Image (cartoon, rainbow, N blue to C red):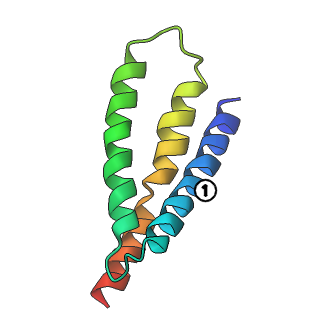
Amino acid sequence: MIWLSVAAGGALGTVSRYGVTLGVARLGASGFPYATLLVNVLGSFCIGIVVAWLGGRADINQALRPMIQVGFLGALTAFPAFSLDALLLTE
């Protein structure tokens, strides 16, 4: 069950990252990977908030914690996307 919740969270995080990328591109921001900066800063902040909030709660479903932390926020702030943007920026 936990594997499925992490997979579902990862799918939502990936789609959210893509949506942010499209939204930033629609604003006309180009040349610098603003979408990557936005999702990594926002996602890292949210990971800290979620860990602090869920860390002390025993009444939370045990599949919800990895779904949010590892699945959704992990996919949202994926390092390979950051690496690709950094490579493209240096080129």
Name, please, the residue furthest toward the bottom.
91
Residue at the (61%, 25%) spot, across then down: 63
In this rendering, is residue 47 above or below 35? above
Residue 20 position, x and y percent, is 49, 60
In this rendering, is residue 55 above or below 9? above
Residue at the (33%, 23%) spot, across then down: 52
Residue 54 position, x and y percent, is 43, 20
In this rendering, is residue 87 above or below 9? below
Quadrant in which the C terminus appears: bottom left
Residue at the (28%, 86%) spot, across then down: 90
Residue at mark 1: 15
88 displayed left or right of 67: left
Q: Residues within 10 Å of mark 1 (few under 14, many from 20)?
A: some
Name, please, the residue furthest toward the left.
90
37 displayed left or right of 69: left
Q: Nearer the viewer, residue 62 or 40?
A: 40
Quadrant in which the N terminus appears: top right
Residue type pointed to by label 1: Val
Residue at disc 1, secondary structure: helix
Residue 27 position, x and y percent, is 43, 71
Residue at the (37%, 38%) spot, across then down: 46
Residue 88 position, x and y percent, is 37, 84
Name, please, the residue furthest toward the front.
27
